[in-house]
Amino acid sequence: MYVLPRISAHPRPWSRRTQHRWYSNPATADPYDLVVIGSGPGGYVAAIKAAQLGMRTACVEKNPTLGGTCLNVGCIPSKALLHNSELYHQAQSGSLAKRGIKFDGLELDLGSMMAQKDSSVKALTGGIDYLFKQNKVDRINGHGTLVSQNEVKVTTGNDSQVIKAKNILIATGSEVTPFPGGGIVVDETSIISSTGALSLASVPKSMVLIGAGVIGVELGSVWSRLGSKVTAVEFLGHVGGLGIDLEIAKNFQRILQKQGMKFMLNTKVDSANKGVENIAVTVTEAGGKTKELDCEVLLVCVGRRPYTENLGLEAVGIGLDDSGRIEVNPRFQTNLSSVFAIGDCVAGPMLAHKAEDEGIVCVEGIAGGPVHIDYDCVPSVIYTHPEVAWVGKTEEQLKESGIPYKVGKFPIAANSRAKTIDDSEGLVKVLACQETDRLLGCHIISAAAGELINEATLAMEYGASCEDVARVCHAHPTFSEALREANLTAYFGKAINFS
């Protein structure tokens, strides 16, 4: 078994109070083995892993709480609202009544819903603080800026200090992309970003989304369920953003429309003018026709961009690509040998779990271990209801690459678990090599898609064939049987429970 070497297991006889004096006086102290800038999913995981490997580690964070965008204003709070708004929708729409659960006086307490969201965020961000202490990672508050390839300047208010490090890892994540051209300015009251959409004080009567990608459809679903009339304007010809299989996107859009959301595809937003009460949004459709939409709240969700400004990168000579991302080699090393970068600020999908994996293998590489990530085996999930998840190649990508492939599909409506809980919308679609039967991609719409996709990811990571998956015994009744049946269809041509 390969054991990663311990870099520098320095004794730690001093107290935490003494440690603060230590790093504020770099002239009289040894450098850290690793200083991580940013405590999001990539940064905090990398810091903990480095400490576990024996490195003296510090993590610099400019915000008062740890966890970055994901835990504070992204993945975590949005999932809390998605789950709770779905429960409200089940009660309000009559879904629970059909199950024999009837009651009078249903009322939405938005304040309590937001409080539950905030409670989950507080627990998880506080959990990182606890993990830092348990793993002896020094938390340093302030904005980190590179002074050299072995020094980080940390600024808090009017005070600053320079911390020395043998290695520096930039994990600063990403930020909301502003509307192109700057013609629509977010004020987080009536013109909001994804951050503002997580903390509205009341349910708007109407909402227009600029963008029907992952963030748009998730947050649009939340407010649609709570009673807002939601219209999504999307420049592309499909929902779900880049990377989604187009057959899946078409089915997904149909489901969301049944739930009440409206979509304007192949449509460009030109401008937005705030009135006394509402906002007039001017759009241009594919044929060139101009139209005006009226809404109470406008959500700008046109994506995210790497957070690489004000880090001192230019001053120390670290290169950026045309998209503002830090350029790294396969070991996540920049053009400065002791400076590394991971997560949203480098190329690749902007996903928390991708950043986590990069953080782990990057610090293992610093410790002398191998560095490898197969980006075809990084799953994506949209947490609507039903969920949408995928990993690997889409059918369009295989066609474009000229790879001979075969398809296996299985409808969720034919799955026994889905039938028992009356939640049977969706399908499982697998793509395999025509010649070898190797699983190349998996695409799922299901209430359990976010969990199911991990079995497909594991299978792909180990180079499994569709027959391999189909021959594994799956518990009954479970949603996972639909994945098995789709693989059975791909390799044998027929499923057992659908024809």
Image (tube, rainbow, N blue to C red):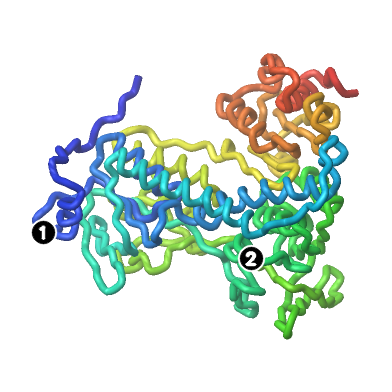
Question: Taking 22 as reference, is 143 left or right?
Answer: right
Q: Which residue is mark 1?
A: 27
Q: Which mark is residue 402?
A: none
* Furthest residue in direction bottom, as rendered: 276
* Furthest residue in direction front, as rendered: 104
Question: Taking 326 as reference, is 190 left or right?
Answer: right
Question: Taking 375 as reference, is 136 left or right?
Answer: left
Expressed as whole percent of the image width and height from the top left, the position of residue 31 reads 18, 50
Q: Nearer the viewer, residue 379 or 20?
A: 20
Expressed as whole percent of the image width and height from the top left, the position of residue 225 reads 76, 54
Q: Residue at x 57, y 55 (%)?
A: 115
Expressed as whole percent of the image width and height from the top left, the position of residue 426 reads 80, 38
Label 2 residue SS: loop
Label 1 residue SS: helix
Q: Which residue is mark 2?
A: 200
The quarter in which the C terminus is drawn is top right
Residue 409 in view: no
Question: Given the image, on which type of amino acid does mark 2 rest?
Answer: Leu
Q: Which of the two labelled residues, at mark 2 and mark 1, occupies the earlier sequence position?
A: 1
- Mark pair 2, 1: CA separation: 49 Å
Question: Taking 465 as reference, is 411 left or right?
Answer: right
Q: Residue at x 55, y 40 (%)?
A: 375
Q: Nearer the viewer, residue 366 or 175?
A: 175
Q: Nearer the viewer, residue 84 or 136?
A: 84
Question: Given the image, on which type of amino acid does mark 1 rest?
Answer: Ala
Q: Residue at x 77, y 43 (%)?
A: 248
Residue 127 in view: yes
Q: Is label 2 in contact with label 1 (beta carbons under 8 Å)?
A: no
Expressed as whole percent of the image width and height from the top left, the position of residue 468 reads 66, 18
Q: Residue at x 69, y 36 (%)?
A: 449
Question: Within 10 angstroms of label 1, few (less than 14), some, or many (20 or more) residues?
Answer: few
